[in-house]
Image (cartoon, rainbow, N blue to C red):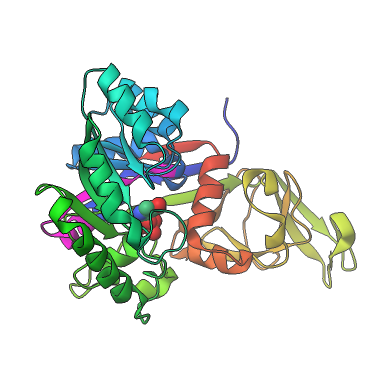
Amino acid sequence: MESLNRVEISRTALRHNFLLLRKQAADATVMVMVKADGYGHGMIECAKVFSELGACAFGVAEAVEGVRLRQAGFTEPVFVLAGILPEIVPALFKYNLTPVVVDDWVLPELSRQAQEHNREIGLHLKTDAGMGRQGCLFEQVSAIVQQINRLPGLRLEGIMAHFPMADDRESQNTSRILSRFHRIIATAREYIPEDCRLHIANSGGLLYGIDTNLDMVRPGISLYGCYPNGEQGGRDAKGDKLQSVMRFVTRVIQLRRVPAGTGLGYGHIFTTSRPTTLVVLPAGYEDGYLRCLSGKSSVLVKGQRAPVVGRISMNLTLVDVTDLDGVQPGDEVVLLGRQGEEGITADEIAGWMGTINYEVLCLFGNLNNRVFVD
Ligand SMILES: *Cc1c(COP(=O)(O)O)cnc(C)c1O
């Protein structure tokens, strides 16, 4: 038995986006970011699609997500980008996950357990080239690299950084961060193994940056069909465009006709000014259709836009369909995605909510029943 609210994920669009990004990556390998349950799209199912097309590695935030990938049978390298505490280390060995370390704190424990397992563990080092969030500082890198070389059982396989403003095409920040990263590498060059791989590009770096690909790229949001800077991302020089992957659909559960002057829902924030036909939807903030969308958003009914009226509540939302013909209980209503000729994008919803497309996808995708289509 399933909810009347449903998030549909298009495998065809996932494939299209992966292939487009892999072309952009050129000689760099592609680590697909599948954290946050694949940005709300379902980590395991998305990983299957990317794996079949030759993704070289998966990126997750916490080790627990990597464990899920291993339990689902994936054999590609899995990078754990956040949260390597000593208590996590046994899982790294058991499930063959690659830690991204951010300082020297956990290195002795990694080395100790590597020796205990009689194994070598590959790791990547995250540097702070100007993101200002996580990673080791410029002046620490050389010493940490030397420490990794010295400690038995550890092998430095990669060094990375992250861009803070790669979504902004106009900003000079990305090229500044990139050259800072190259200077960081230079300070430790003599200690860095030959085959150590360098990587820095997220979607913004990959799509808009210059010479940011290095040895590996780490796209996330673009795999899921959104541009990191919203819709102005547009198409690339060849006219290729990312395809949106997610639709969020619900159904009409009641059709109501109310007279002019009817206050609607909690707080009566909207009162009808004409005889009004309303549809009731079984979706609300519990489903990620947040209360702050009240009075701002539109949905698609019969392929046409209709405004949400009154306050969105936990499980119910009202839509004014007075101007539409032939609406029936049971009809499909689209909250995100296309219906007929019309479409509502994650960027449009993000604008109504005062946030970014990333948050809309995580919210809708991770709070609703997902079904894979095509
Ligand atoms: C999430 C993440 C990415 C992917 O970023 P997008 O903007 O979604 O492409 C890349 N690198 C790191 C370190 C990340 O945390």
**Residue beneath the point at 21% across and 55% down:** 198
- Magenta residue check for 259: no
Highlighted range, magenta: 20-35
Tell me the quadrant of ligand 1: bottom left
**Residue beneath the point at 42% across and 37% down:** 84
Question: Can residue 237 be seen by looking at this rendering?
Answer: yes
Q: Quick check: 233 above or below 129?
A: below
Please identify the quadrant where the N terminus is shown. top right
State left or right for residue 292 relative to residue 264. Answer: left
Expressed as whole percent of the image width and height from the top left, the position of residue 290 reads 67, 54
Q: Quick check: 313 above or below 211?
A: above
**Frontmost residue, 186 versus 212:** 186
**Frontmost residue, 78 versus 89:** 89
The image quarter in which residue 258 lies:
bottom right
- Magenta residue check for 29: yes
Please identify the quadrant where the C terminus is shown. top left
Q: Quick check: 180 above or below 147?
A: below
Expressed as whole percent of the image width and height from the top left, the position of residue 12 reads 28, 47
The image quarter in which residue 263 lies:
bottom right
**Frontmost residue, 363 versus 275:** 363
**Residue beneath the point at 22% across and 38% down:** 150
Question: Can residue 284 be seen by looking at this rendering?
Answer: no
State left or right for residue 322 relative to residue 136. Answer: right
